[in-house]
Amino acid sequence: MRAYLMYIPESYSEDTPTPLMLAFHGNGGNMDAFLNEADFRGLAESEGFVLIYPQGTVLDGEETHWNPLLPSETNKSDVDDFGFIELLLDALSTSINLDETRIYATGYSNGAGFVYGLACYLNDKITAVAPVSGSMYIEMNNNCNPGQPTSVAVFNGTQDFIRPYDGFSGYLLSVEDAVGYWTGHNELTTAAAFDSFNTNGLTVERSVYSGGTNGASVALFKVIGGDHVWFDFQIDSVPFNRLIWDFVSQFDTNGLRQD
């Protein structure tokens, strides 16, 4: 038995295919608290998308978690969270008129690691992702096999000691290497467009790689001095959650949207 919170905007019509955003809490977290921490409900109303906050399971009787990796002897979790999300999406598609070309995912910390896993292992269903204060696993780098271009927006702080910006030897990729994986997968060969912002007492360096296969893009938001948090900064008066939505919503499974 698994649980999730669902928010359907008032503008929803069963006659219109509607995009979906999945939002995953971090290790030890829960869907209710994450709904308040990373609250996309206002955006769901104004932009017209369905919002889902799934609940992770308890690992070894201790804290809730997401299993971001495939089954292996070294994986400490045997929970099939990819199967859970696949079944969840199948179930939702029978009760809601979902635009299955526009299913997006974001997450925090362990939830962000799971979002990387969705981009790797459930790539036929997930359109674009935005991991926040999370890491891509070295194991993913070795066996990730996405079947389509996948746009990714990455948000990490340089003073994050839970998911270090420079990675963790033998376990976690550095943020730069994770970005490098996705720029390579999306065949992004030109230099990034770079800009820098001072916001909420932080410096945010934004690097955007664009013009990849089918218009795919990868964006890195490097938060100088940023900690292990769900960020709340703004860029050009655009709040953090909208930065995420504005990035992912540019894409469908065919690539950069034309409308």
Image (cartoon, rainbow, N blue to C red):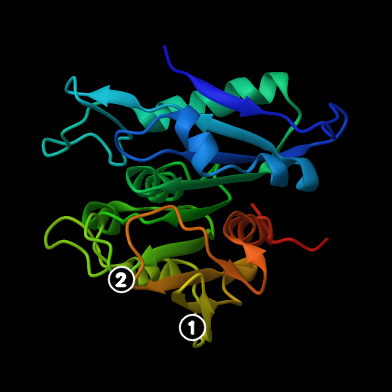
Q: How many marks?
A: 2
Circle 1/circle 2 CB separation < 8 Å: no
> Which dot marks residue 189?
1
Cα separation between marks 1 and 2: 25 Å
Question: In this view of the protein, which residue sits in the foreground, 63 or 57?
Answer: 63
- Horizontally, residue 168 falls left or right of residue 94, namely left
Q: Would residue 31 be visible to someone looking at this image? A: yes
Q: Which mark is residue 147?
A: none
Q: Could you say which disc has been placed on residue 158 in the image?
A: 2
The residue shown at (51%, 23%) is 4
Residue under the point 37% across and 73% down: 180
Decide if residue 86 is on the left or right side of residue 235. left
Which image quadrant is residue 228 in?
Answer: bottom left
x and y percentages locating residue 138 in the rendered image: 22, 57
Q: 207 or 127, which is in the foreground?
A: 207
Quadrant of the image occupied by residue 169? bottom left
State the image coordinates of residue 246 (x, y, percent, origin top left). 67, 60
Q: Residue at x 58, y 57 (%)?
A: 244
